[in-house]
Image: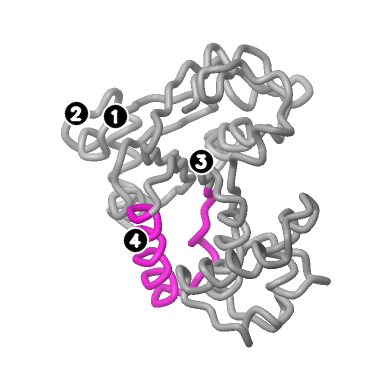
């Protein structure tokens, strides 16, 4: 799905992502794991076409030179949803479909399908983001990300701003959605428990580089360097 060859990001004179070579397969779940400032969100934003980079990035086998058609194949969810406050939940979800001149009937059918998928009612979709709970806002954000039926879901710490009970419920729902739809998923988290919950491969990052890539259980059983064990020990201690 994605192929990165020596992809690097620099902000001014500061390296944010070291030259990175990485392949993400179709239907795969990849968790980008690491402490704050490790480069995981920078890597995700690079996959979303939201930051300039050097190197080569391929999507579905073709080098990306124009991000506009690629972005329509991507669904992107950030912390607390990132919803437009002046639009209702319904307006947020349907924004891009309306921009693309989808017929009203198609929009309504897709909206109903997604509302059932995430467990939201019509009355909740009529509210503005400020009138919704954190969990409801994230469900709306997931609906918005899925509206155009993207091939890939990019999730930037989608559970971090939620209370523990809501977080667990939404995590279970999100894992079910991922399994049901079979999409490629790249998720950013600094939480080892979340990484284990969603499974798949993990890329543990530090100082803008991937220090270990592979099955999540290998982080504990086959650490590639002392930092891996240090990160796991710190996570377990909290």
From the image, tell me which residue sits under label 2. 222
**Numbered tag placed on residue 176 in the rendering:** 4
In the rendered image, residue 93, in percent from the top left (x then y), is placed at: 67, 64
* Mark 1 to mark 3 CA distance (whole Å): 22 Å
Among the two numbered marks 4 and 2 on one chain, the one whose residue lies closer to the N terminus: 4
Provide the secondary structure element on which disc 2 rests. loop
* Mark 4 to mark 2 CA distance (whole Å): 29 Å
**Numbered tag placed on residue 151 in the rendering:** 3
From the image, tell me which residue sits under label 1. 214
Between label 3 and label 4, give the one nearer the viewer: 3
Give the residue at x 21% y 39%: 217
Give the residue at x 59% y 80%: 133
Provide the secondary structure element on which disc 3 rests. loop
Among the two numbered marks 1 and 3 on one chain, the one whose residue lies closer to the N terminus: 3
Q: Are marks 1 and 3 in contact (CB under 8 Å)?
A: no
Q: Are marks 1 and 2 in contact (CB under 8 Å)?
A: yes
Give the residue at x 62% y 18%: 8
Among the two numbered marks 1 and 4 on one chain, the one whose residue lies closer to the N terminus: 4
Q: How is the image coloured?
A: one colour
User: Does the magenta portion include 224?
Assistant: no
Q: Is residue 25 above or below residue 87?
A: above
Residues rendered magenta in the picture:
155-180
Between label 1 and label 3, give the one nearer the viewer: 3
Provide the secondary structure element on which disc 4 rests. helix
Between label 1 and label 2, give the one nearer the viewer: 1
User: Within 10 Å of the Cα at label 1, are there few (<14), some (14-19), or many (20+) other Cα atoms?
Assistant: some
Between label 4 and label 2, give the one nearer the viewer: 4
In the rendered image, residue 163, in percent from the top left (x then y), is placed at: 47, 74
User: Within 10 Å of the Cα at label 3, are there few (<14), some (14-19), or many (20+) other Cα atoms?
Assistant: many
């Amino acid at each position: 799905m994605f192929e990165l060859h020596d992809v690097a990001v620099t902000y001014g004179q500061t390296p944010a992502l070291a030259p990175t070579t990485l392949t993400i397969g179709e239907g795969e779940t990849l968790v980008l794991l690491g402490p704050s400032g490790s480069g995981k969100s920078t890597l995700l934003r690079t996959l979303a076409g939201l930051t300039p980079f050097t190197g080569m990035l391929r999507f579905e086998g073709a080098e990306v030179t124009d991000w506009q058609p690629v972005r329509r194949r991507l669904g992107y969810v950030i912390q607390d949803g990132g919803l437009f406050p002046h639009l209702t939940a319904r307006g947020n979800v349907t924004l891009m479909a309306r921009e693309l001149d989808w017929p009203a009937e198609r929009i309504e059918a897709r909206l109903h399908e997604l509302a059932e998928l995430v467990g939201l009612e019509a009355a909740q979709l009529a509210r503005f983001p400020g009138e919704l709970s954190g969990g409801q806002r994230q469900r709306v954000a997931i609906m918005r990300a899925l509206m155009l039926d993207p091939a890939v879901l990019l999730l930037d710490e989608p559970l971090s701003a939620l209370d523990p009970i809501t977080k667990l419920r939404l995590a279970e729902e999100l894992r079910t959605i991922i399994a049901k739809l079979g999409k490629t998923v790249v998720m950013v988290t600094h939480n080892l428990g979340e990484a284990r919950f969603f499974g798949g491969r993990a890329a543990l990052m530090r100082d803008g580089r991937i220090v270990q890539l592979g099955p999540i259980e290998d982080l504990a059983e086959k650490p590639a360097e002392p930092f891996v064990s240090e990160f796991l020990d710190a996570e377990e201690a909290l």
